Amino acid sequence: QVQLVESGGGLVQAGGSLRLSCAASGRTFTTHTMGWFRQAPGKEREFVGRIRWSGGAPSYADSVKGRFTISRDNAKATVYLQMNTLKPEDTAVYYCAAGDSFTTSGSPRFYNYWGRGTQVTVSS
């Protein structure tokens, strides 16, 4: 009974930046971990990063370390994905997900709730 809505996707030139938002509503007190995933055409869904509502350092996939930053605003029940120095290979549908465990795994199987996704396209 958790709803997630992503926003902020769009078309950007290589080297540019975008900030994605994920607004959570419903029984958010049951969730502990918020994750970002992405999926390009013909590819498996890929872990991007995660953060916990309760604190601790965010974690990132190697492919985005140093370029992407995850943050949160607990009062607004919103998490963000700041994407800098974007590359064409970052083009994908980006999904927000919530899990009711304290998982640090990058596997989608540990996340119970998913948004519908937002398209990010990076042109060269």
Image (tube, rainbow, N blue to C red):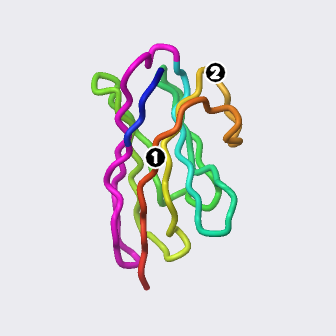
Numbered label attached to residue 116: 1
Task: Specify whether residue 77 is painted magenta.
Answer: no
Q: Residue at x 34, y 71 (%)?
A: 11
Marks 1 and 2, how far apart at CA: 21 Å
Label 1 SS: loop
Q: Amino acid at mark 1?
A: Arg
Q: Amino acid at mark 2?
A: Ser
In this rendering, position of residue 76 left or right of residue 114:
left
Q: Residue at x 62, y 61 (%)?
A: 63
Q: Residue at x 67, y 28 (%)?
A: 103
Q: Nearer the viewer, residue 5 or 72?
A: 5
- Per the rendered image, the range of residues in magenta is 6-30
- Residue 65 position in % (x across, y down): 56, 56
Q: Nearer the viewer, residue 51 or 45?
A: 45
Q: Is residue 18 above or below residue 3?
A: below
Numbered label attached to residue 101: 2
Q: Nearer the viewer, residue 100 or 2?
A: 2
Q: Residues within 10 Å of mark 2 (few under 14, many from 20)?
A: some
Q: Quadrant of residue 118?
A: bottom left
